[in-house]
Image: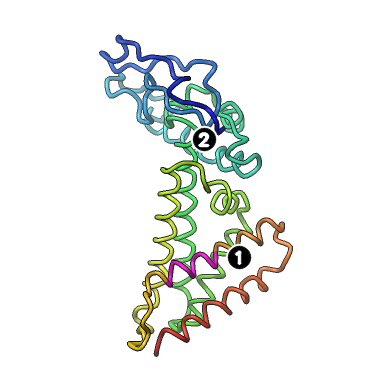
C-alpha cells in the first residue's frame, strides 16, 4: 500500500461537488488501502447536506452506518493481521466485511485512516483489559505488576492480529501513525505510574526521570511481546510473564520505597 503519490492519483475536484457537498461515486481504480485521500470524497461522516437516512428492519440509517463501520474495523484488523498493512487493499477489506467499496468511503478516507481507527480501538481494548486486571488484583505492588503484565501478554496471545498490528504493522507507516504510536506508549507509561502512586513513593535519592523510565519499561514490554509474537508464541505465557517481571521488579526496587 505504500509508494503511491496521492496528489498525482486523486482526481481533480468537481465544481458541482464542491458547491453542493454531495459525495461522488468512488472511482473504480482507487482500491489500494493505502492510497491518499480523494479530495472529492466525503471524509468519513458523509455529506452534511445528505438527506435523512431511512429506517429498514427497525434500524435507523445512523445505526446501520455504525454497524457497517464496525464490520470494516473487524475486517481491517483481520486483513492487517493476515496480510500486513502493505499487503491490504480496500477491495480485500470490503470483501472480508461483506460490503461494497462505496461503504468503505462512507466511514474512512483511505486505508491509513482505517489503520488508525483499528489501532486506536485495539489500544483502548488493551488499556481496558490492563486496568480491569489491576482493579481486581490485591493492593500490593508486585501483585498488581503481575496482574497488569499478565493481562498485556494474555491479550497478545488471544488476539495475534491485534498484536501484529500493535507491534509490527504501525511502525514507519506515516507521521500520523507514528504520532498515534508514540501517544499509545505515553498512555501506557502513565498507566504504569498511575496505578502505583498510592502504594509506593519515588525514592527521593533517585536522580533519574521517572517518566522517561516508565517509557523505557513500556519499550521493554513491547520488545519482549513483539519477539514472542514473531516466534509464533513459542514459549509459554508464564515464561514471558516471569521475564517481564524480572525487569519490572528490579527497576521498581531500585527507584521506589514503600
In the rendered image, the quadrant that contains the C terminus is bottom left
Quick check: 13 left or right of 169? left
Secondary structure under badge 1? helix
Vertical side of 211 occupied by 61: above or below: above
Rendered position, 97 above or below 15: below
116 left or right, relative to 150 = left
Residue in the image at 52% along x and 23% along y: 101
Residue 4, horizontal then vertical, whole percent: 52, 27
Q: From the viewer's side, name the closer residue of 231 and 92.
A: 231
Residue 177 on image: x %, y %: 45, 45
Q: Residues within 10 Å of mark 2 (few under 14, many from 20)?
A: many
Numbered disc 2: secondary structure: helix
Magenta segment boundaries in residue numbering: 213-221
Q: Left or right of 174: which side holds 49?
A: left
Give the Cα distance between marks 1 and 2.
30 Å
**Image quarter (top left, top right, bottom left or bottom right) of the N terminus:** top right
- Point out residue 64 in the picture as x, y percentages from the top left corner: 43, 31
Residue drawn at the location 49% of the way across and 58% of the way down: 126
Q: Which residue is mark 2?
A: 72
* Residue projecting furthest to the top: 16
How packed mark 1 is, by other alpha carbons closer than 10 Å (few <14, some 14-19, many 20 or more), is some
User: x and y percent of residue 168 in the render?
Assistant: 58, 50
Residue 120, placed above or below residue 18:
below
Q: Earlier in the sequence, mark 1 or mark 2?
A: 2
- Residue at horizontal 65 percent and vertical 57 percent from the top: 229
**In which image quadrant can residue 14 be found?**
top left
User: Which numbered disc covers residue 224?
Assistant: 1
Q: Nearer the viewer, mark 1 or mark 2?
A: 1
In this view, the residue in front, 142 or 6, is 6
Residue 144 drawn in magenta: no
Whether the residues at callouts 1 and 2 have beta carbons within 8 Å, the answer is no
Amino acid at each position: 500500500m505504500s509508494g503511491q503519490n496521492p496528489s498525482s492519483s486523486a482526481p481533480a475536484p468537481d465544481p458541482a461537488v464542491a458547491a453542493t457537498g454531495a459525495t461522488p461515486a468512488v472511482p473504480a481504480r482507487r482500491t489500494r488501502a493505502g492510497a491518499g485521500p480523494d479530495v472529492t470524497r466525503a471524509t468519513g461522516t458523509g455529506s452534511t447536506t445528505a438527506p435523512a437516512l431511512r429506517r429498514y428492519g427497525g434500524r435507523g440509517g445512523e445505526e446501520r452506518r455504525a454497524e457497517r463501520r464496525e464490520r470494516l474495523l473487524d475486517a481491517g484488523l483481520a486483513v492487517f493481521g493476515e496480510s500486513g498493512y502493505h499487503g491490504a487493499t480496500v477491495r480485500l477489506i470490503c470483501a472480508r466485511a461483506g460490503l461494497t467499496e462505496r461503504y468503505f468511503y462512507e466511514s474512512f478516507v483511505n486505508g491509513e485512516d482505517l489503520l488508525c481507527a483499528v489501532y486506536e480501538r485495539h489500544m483502548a481494548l488493551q488499556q481496558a483489559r490492563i486496568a480491569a486486571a489491576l482493579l481486581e488484583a490485591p493492593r500490593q505492588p508486585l501483585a498488581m505488576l503481575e496482574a497488569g503484565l499478565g493481562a498485556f501478554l494474555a491479550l497478545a496471545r488471544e488476539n495475534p492480529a491485534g498484536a501484529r498490528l500493535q507491534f509490527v504493522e504501525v511502525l514507519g507507516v506515516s507521521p500520523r501513525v507514528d504520532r498515534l504510536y508514540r501517544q499509545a506508549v505515553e498512555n501506557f507509561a502513565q498507566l504504569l505510574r498511575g496505578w502505583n502512586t498510592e502504594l509506593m513513593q519515588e525514592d527521593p535519592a533517585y536522580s533519574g526521570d521517572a517518566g522517561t523510565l516508565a517509557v523505557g519499561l513500556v519499550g521493554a514490554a513491547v520488545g519482549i511481546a513483539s519477539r514472542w509474537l514473531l516466534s509464533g508464541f513459542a514459549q509459554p505465557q508464564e515464561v514471558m510473564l516471569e521475564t517481564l517481571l524480572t525487569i519490572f521488579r528490579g527497576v521498581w526496587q531500585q527507584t521506589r520505597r514503600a
